[in-house]
Amino acid sequence: GDSVTQMEGPVTLSEEAFLTINCTYTATGYPSLFWYVQYPGEGLQLLLKATKADDKGSNKGFEATYRKETTSFHLEKGSVQVSDSAVYFCALTRNNNDMRFGAGTRLTVKP
Amino acid sequence: EAGVAQSPRYKIIEKRQSVAFWCNPISGHATLYWYQQILGQGPKLLIQFQNNGVVDDSQLPKDRFSAERLKGVDSTLKIQPAKLEDSAVYLCASSTVRLAESSGANVLTFGAGSRLTVL
């Protein structure tokens, strides 16, 4: 079945460091891909999405490009801030059915 | 716009007791989901409603879990009797997308979740 695999955490970075969180997927056809973020004590929030190959989703300085050839959707940010500390989830959905989530990657940014 | 409302935020019960969680989705959202998020894991779908009908409940442990959305708006998830392994955060989400649409961008809006601890 469809699934998402993301890099294990936790990830600890210093402020202004470069961030990459890897995400790869397994799915038939052409899924839509998402990154959700969960801040402490809050629900999941959509960070960005891409619905077809080569699309780049971006929001709040975060970017991810839908790479069908490598079945990947890696999350990147050029300069992280303390306020980016959260758990990040990669997810996919196909034909608007069940949204499948990765296990999440906890990011801690230190001043 | 008001978000997805859930209650209670926290609940502690003993095993074999029952518990119910309530969710009110964003107004106008036809699709409602219940997810289970065990500590250290990603959310797992329990049940999906389209209006007041069940679309997918294949991962719902029906011997102890039940859910309803009688008027196509708010929903209740019940666990009876609870087991230790049911300790998790129960997330409700909603979306505007109907099954008939095929834009492929099914964006879910999540509530803050209900954290259940079973002792």
Image (cartoon, rainbow, N blue to C red):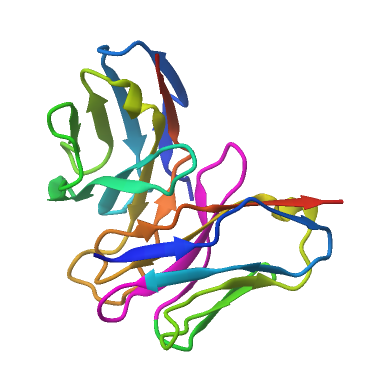
The verdict on residue A37 being magenta is yes
Q: Residue at x 42, y 19 (%)?
A: B11
**Magenta stretch?**
A26-51
Provide residue B59's location: percent of width, then percent of height: 20, 45
Give residue A18's quadrant in the image. bottom right
Provide residue B52's location: percent of width, then percent of height: 15, 45
Q: What is the total number of numbered labels drawn onto the structure image?
A: 0
Q: Is residue A33 above or below residue A91?
A: below
Q: Is residue B69 above or below residue A22?
A: above
Q: Residue at x 44, y 57 (%)?
A: A102
Q: Residue at x 28, y 21 (%)?
A: B83
Give residue B84's quadrant in the image. top left
Question: Does residue A39 appear in the picture of this structure?
Answer: yes
Name the side, left or right, on which A86 lies relative to B72.
right
Q: Nearer the viewer, residue B28 or A50?
A: A50
Q: Nearer the viewer, residue B83 or A95?
A: B83
Provide residue A105's location: percent of width, then percent of height: 57, 54
